[in-house]
Amino acid sequence: MNKSNIDYKAVGKALGVKHFTIKNPLEKEHSFLKKIDEATTIIEISGLHKKTIFGSESGDTSLEKWNMLCLKELGTATTIEEIRNVNYYTPRGSESERLSCAKLNKLCSETIESVSNLEESRLVFERMLYGSKYKMNALLKWISFCDTIEEVREVFEKTSRSVKHRNIALLKWVEITTTIEEVREVFEKTIDGSEARNTALLKWIEITTTIEEIREVFEKSPRGSGSHSIALLKWISFCTTIEEIRDMYEKTIDGSDIRKSAFKKIDKLCLNAIESATTTEEIREVFEKTIRLSSSWKAAIVKTQKILNS
């Protein structure tokens, strides 16, 4: 539109508006078109476009030039950082956005695939965009090279922004633990109800060797959970005295299979003790630890009577 051929006052009067409501927007549009023509960088043109009106000549022209400048810069971009920078400034839904995403995805995949050691994997992880699938893939690659707790701890500390990433690091951490102290440390970093916490509890149970150790795991396990039950079963296996199994028995749920297992072991140990007892005093000591109406409870009564009759 050649604005010099317009009589603003006459046109304004004919349209029933003030002449400046026509003149000012047209002059602003002309000024914008000149600035768009002079713009040479993506940041300049994107800034100008944001000030235009949708559907206007300046809006369409600036968008076209914005996309063109992005495509031009994308053509020379060769690193993940350069491509990502172009992608960040591309118009949403444009050809330059689509092509920059494709180029970035291809380079990220190739970069992650080429990693061959711990140090490389760490650097690649740091270069991947947070929240992208490549950040996750880079994390998995980095984790695969970790052989020590110190290495996994570094991964864990670098993933503080994502619960999902932290969980992956914690699972690897649990996997390489070999002592109670190590598994306790990683357990304290897990979240209630998470896969990492449950896995840590199971590993903790696996490496326990004493009643004191298994009791600690049992107390950390959620009541009614799988780890809670497994801890009790292992606790039973550690019990060698009536006192130990009675203490464990009190922790079980009435009617549960675990309580039945504990009951059988109490009964067995009590029967053995009664069988070897030679005085009523010895039998009485065992009798006080039996469960009423159990086989050992009845055996104590029978043997006491037998001694009294002799």
Image: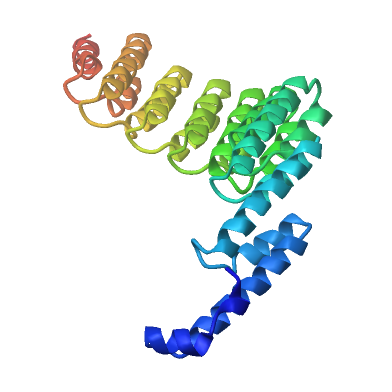
Q: Nearer the viewer, residue 128 or 295?
A: 128
Q: Is residue 126 above or below residue 35?
A: above
Q: Nearer the viewer, residue 306 or 208?
A: 208
Image coordinates of residue 200 in percent, x first then y, are 54, 31
Q: Is residue 30 left or right of residue 82?
A: left
Looking at the picture, how far across and down is residue 113, in whole percent? Answer: 72, 21
- Up-down: is 204 above or below 309? below
Indicate left or right for 261 with 90 as reference: left
- Image point (69%, 22%), residue name: 144
Residue 142 in sight in this render: no
Residue 165 in view of the camera: yes
Nearer to the camera, 244 or 70: 70
- If the image is split into quadrants, where does the N terminus sit? bottom right
The quadrant holding residue 224 is top left
Residue at horizontal 55 percent and vertical 80 percent from the top? 6
Q: How is the image coloured?
A: rainbow
Q: Which image quadrant for residue 206?
A: top right
Quadrant where the C terminus is found in the figure: top left
Q: How far across and down, in percent of the image, does residue 61 sit?
A: 62, 57
